[in-house]
Amino acid sequence: MTTASMGLIGVGTMGSALALNIAENGHDIALYNLDARTIDALIDQAGDLAPRLTKTETVADLVVAMPSPRAIILLVPAGGPVETTIDALLPHLSPGDTIIDGGNSDFRDTMRRTERVEAAGFQYLGVGVSGGEEGARHGPSMMVGGSKDSWEPLRPVLEAIAAKYQGSPCVAHLGPDGAGHFVKTVHNGIEYADMQMIAEVYGLLRDGEGRAPGEIAPLFTRWNDGALQSYLIEITGQVLAAVDPETGNPMVDMIVDQAGQKGTGRWTVIEAIRMGQSASVIEAAVGARVLSSERPVRQAASEILGEAPKGTASFDEADLEAALLVGRILAYAQGFRILKAASEEFSWDLDYATIAEIWRAGCIIRSSLLDDISKAFRSELPHGRLVLSEEFAALLQQNIGALRRVVAQAVTIGLPVPALSSAVSWYDEIRQARGTADVIQGQRDFFGAHGFRRVDKEGDFHGPW
Ligand code: 6PG
């Protein structure tokens, strides 16, 4: 067991759930929240666990309530609130204390904060926590960044509260300072892509075939028993089956079609592009959320430009399932490419197999594919690329035809499939031995004398334009 005493700042939905998880695993925990009433409500409902929870009135009181060494988890909104909380904590800490940021912080902030907190004589961990409220309560997946010295003493408690996949805790120390939050950011990028592709398939059935949500739900439930088995497919079935208690309509039909986003999907794309990586499926998903928010424009455009005809199509269900499988594999593949690029740029030495392993339970993108992905990364991969592994190359080849048929049919009717179509294009780009960048190089040389390399000899050349 860890010798550190536990504290938590930010007792919202996630904070409350995590506090109960920690208490259930045998630890007393001191709590502080700006609005103390949430702590009262938590203690009221904590039952047998209530004696383990201590309410404190200020950040200073929280520190005083905890014997040293302390481990203080922050579950406050990313950005300013994390900064302000660190400012408030630093004057009260003792050597050996650790601040753990468990929010969705920008990894660059985490790098900077780690340096600052360590310079002040304390320890800092940036931990990506995935799994929503249910995960926080019964076992999240946790991606840890920071020094090994900060991680080792806290490892037992973090392993105890983590989700378990066949008994293995879904938490690992992945690298220094920002590594954990970076991996969580990419996790969220993949989450955006997977959610978007699922929504696209739903759209094909709703608009293309004119099916009601309640008729689509069983399909997702069935798919969840096959190759698509995953948390997101499972909950989609439940979302589509739900009925609005107020109106009796399908719940999903009563929800405004504008998706929110807190930034992690966008950060994934920004970092990918900054590192020269293509993350087209994730980018399409972020773009689709952005366009979803332009509801008035979409509504006007549906009048002016006209919408795709409704209820005229018939999609092959097996094709839809296989299309989602291919899209999911390619989204994971793009995510792992970004991780590889970051690992090289920041010398993090990320272990991709371990990352896949700690995503197998607890987190939002958990799926049956991740066990195979971890095995692929433990074997010799051509160029270190997932899509080139024997198993995934075969899976892609078997199923890519279905993705092509689905995308072709959707595009022909005029139904939007931005992420699925990006997936098929990316697949085709990456398998093309001779691409079309020869023309780009010719154009660049033509207008800017940028020069090009030739296929038949070394050197820098110009064309005869
Ligand atoms: C998780 C999720 C979570 C994230 C939500 C909302 O892994 O548990 O990624 O951390 O906050 O999914 O994210 P958006 O508001 O950006 O959709």
Image: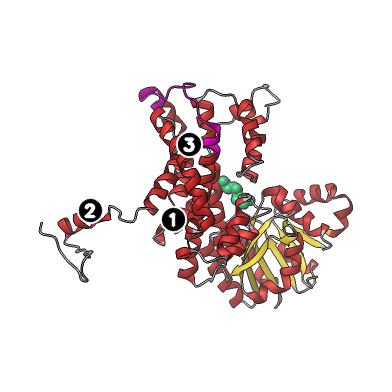
| Residue 167 pos. (x, y %) | 75, 60
Count of numbered tags: 3
- Residue position for label 3: 292
Nearer to the camera, 255 or 142: 142
Q: From where the camera sits, is residue 16 visible?
A: no
Nearer to the camera, 324 or 226: 226
Q: Residue at x 48, y 51 (%)?
A: 266
- Residue position for label 1: 270
Given this view, does label 2 or label 3 mark the residue nearer the observer? 2
Q: Is residue 148 above or below residue 294?
A: below
Quadrant in which residue 161 is drawn = bottom right
Amino acid at circle 2: Val
| Residue 96 pos. (x, y %) | 71, 77
Marks 1 and 2: in contact by CB < 8 Å?
no
Label located before the other in sequence (2 or 1):
1
Amino acid at circle 3: Ser
| Residue 320 pos. (x, y %) | 53, 36
Q: Residue at x 20, y 71 (%)?
A: 459
- Residue position for label 2: 439
Amino acid at circle 1: Ile
Label located before the other in sequence (1 or 3):
1
